[in-house]
Image (cartoon, rainbow, N blue to C red):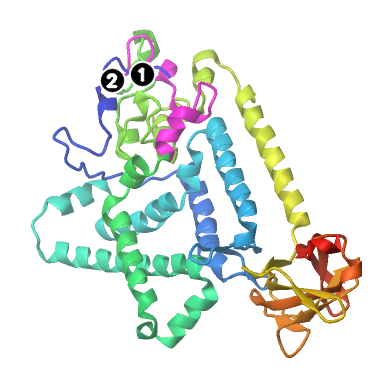
């Protein structure tokens, strides 16, 4: 996209001054149709974000990312450590989907869906507008001495920010350790679980720091997605773009004068009012072209449309458009790269669904006890000792679990008072067992056995083991 001859603005990010200090951004309060759409989307997503860890599907938390225990729930579907390959594929699908979306529609995810943007612009920023006022009032308040008004507003704002940060930290913790455990910790009292209380305080401090001070710098400095868009975007990507053909004309932009024939004078429709700059939450000038700081929040579109409407010029000077649309009037179409991403996405989704259909609710692992070979018992019986582990991925207790051999005539004995046991919901059962087989039924020194796992009379899982015997029994 055409950019100004002076490209020096690209030498530094918009939130730094020439001497490298923080340039605080005071964005004008946005308004307009896109902002109203964003509010609807944001509050729906906020409701979802807060409610998701407390919603249960078949007894499973709707979303949970328990990294310490390596247990994850995605849309109510549990992933255990044994299902890590499924979780990895799910994450890859998510990354490719975001990449496809970026190639097609730029950084729209950042402006409309990213939790950082939603909390910053639709929660903390709106509270700031309510307490401190709009752009100019905020600037005046920052520059004025610490009088009663400034102290009152600062204490009120910071107190509300801390409370909201604490709520966000609790929701974040519910995603990590599970909502049931979080509610239990709250009921027991914070002093009963100091090991969780301190991380909660740290999370609260981090969220407060991010939303009260670091702000838009998360998107510009910390988040790698801004850099990634420079690799993914091309001339056909739909982004928030300034129509420089229309805005600059032959003789460039010019301040508005009533009754002046701008077209005859060769000036474009941009009246250089700077409202698109003042409303930008990252402090950039969209007229300079696509920049890594732009999160596609559409605030500049709304502001420019309002200005165009007030001076009786067509709206859309800043709009969702591709470079090719502005330069060549080309409409959006799927490129070879987009088709490639779509093909990979469809294949991965197909693989994931296939794996999910083949996935068992119960997973059995039977392994030979280390250092043990076999034992020759009376009556020409060969015995091997194994350890077993059964994982129950469901929210229901599995009772009357027993083992049986397929093909071979033999006996499986558990090292317990009973040959049946129970596997608790979302838990595991483990122990030791002996497999005893008559020597005449063995085919050699190493025999592959198929072990069937039953719950009552229902076959719930199968697994295989190698049964060792003396070589002379081959």
The answer to whether residue 423 is above or below residue 472 is: below
The residue indicated by pointer 1 is 3
Q: Which quarter shows the N terminus?
A: top left
CA separation in Å, label 1 and label 2: 8 Å
Residue 440 screen position, x and y as percent: 91, 68
Rate crowding at label 1 as few (under 14), some (14 to 19) or many (20 or more) other CA atoms within 10 Å.
Answer: few
Horizontal side of 259 relative to 45 (left or right) equals: left
Q: Which residues are magenta?
A: 225-253
Residue 7, numbered label:
2
Q: Nearer the viewer, residue 183 or 125?
A: 183
Q: Farthest residue to the bottom: give it.
A: 417
Asked if residue 252 is among those painted magenta in the image, a careful observer would answer: yes
Q: Residue at x 49, y 79 (%)?
A: 183
Asked if residue 204 is among those painted magenta in the image, a careful observer would answer: no
CB atoms of marks 1 and 2 within 8 Å: yes
Q: Residue at x 31, y 23 (%)?
A: 256
Q: Quadrant of residue 103?
A: top right
Q: Which quarter shows the C terminus?
A: bottom right
């Amino acid at each position: 996209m055409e950019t100004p001859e002076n490209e020096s603005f690209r030498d530094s990010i918009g939130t730094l001054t020439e001497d490298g200090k923080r340039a605080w951004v005071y964005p004008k309060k946005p308004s307009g149709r896109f902002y109203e759409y964003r509010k609807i989307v944001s509050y729906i997503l906020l409701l979802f974000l807060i409610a998701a860890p407390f919603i249960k599907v078949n007894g499973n938390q709707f979303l949970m990312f328990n990294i310490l225990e390596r247990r994850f729930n995605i849309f109510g579907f549990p992933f255990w450590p044994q299902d890590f390959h499924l979780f990895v594929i799910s994450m890859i699908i998510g990354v490719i989907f975001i990449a496809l979306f970026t190639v097609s529609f730029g950084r729209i995810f950042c402006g409309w869906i990213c939790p950082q943007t939603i909390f910053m612009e639709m929660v903390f920023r709106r509270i700031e507008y309510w307490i401190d006022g709009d752009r100019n009032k905020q600037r005046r308040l920052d520059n004025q001495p610490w009088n009663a008004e400034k102290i009152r507003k600062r204490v009120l704002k910071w107190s509300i920010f801390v409370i909201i940060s604490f709520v966000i930290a609790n929701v974040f913790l519910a995603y990590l350790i599970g909502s049931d455990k979080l509610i239990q910790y709250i009921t027991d009292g914070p002093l009963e679980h100091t090991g969780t209380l301190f991380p909660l305080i740290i999370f609260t401090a981090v969220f407060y720091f991010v939303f009260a001070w670091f702000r838009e710098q998360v998107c510009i400095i910390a988040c790698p997605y801004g850099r990634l868009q420079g690799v993914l975007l091309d001339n056909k990507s739909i982004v928030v773009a300034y129509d420089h053909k229309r805005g600059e004309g032959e003789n460039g932009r010019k301040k508005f004068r009533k009754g002046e024939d701008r077209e005859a004078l060769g000036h474009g429709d941009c009246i250089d009012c700077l409202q698109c700059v003042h409303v930008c939450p990252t402090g950039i000038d969209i007229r300079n072209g696509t920049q890594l700081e732009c999160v596609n929040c559409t605030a500049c579109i709304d502001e420019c449309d309002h200005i165009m409407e007030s001076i009786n010029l067509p709206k859309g000077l800043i709009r969702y458009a591709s470079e090719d649309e502005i330069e060549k009037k080309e409409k959006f179409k799927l490129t070879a790269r987009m088709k490639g991403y779509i093909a990979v996405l469809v294949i991965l989704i197909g693989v994931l669904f296939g794996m999910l259909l083949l996935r068992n609710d119960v997973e059995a692992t039977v392994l030979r006890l280390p250092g043990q070979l076999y034992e020759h018992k009376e009556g020409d019986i060969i015995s091997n000792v194994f350890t077993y582990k059964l994982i129950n991925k469901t929210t229901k207790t599995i009772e009357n679990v027993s083992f049986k051999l397929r093909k071979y005539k033999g006996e499986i004995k558990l090292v317990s008072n009973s040959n049946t046991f129970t596997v608790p919901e979302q838990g595991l059962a483990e122990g030791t067992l002996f497999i005893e087989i008559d020597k005449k039924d063995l085919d050699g020194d190493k025999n592959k056995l198929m072990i069937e796992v039953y719950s009552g009379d229902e076959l719930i899982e199968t697994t295989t083991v190698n049964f060792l015997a003396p070589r002379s029994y081959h």
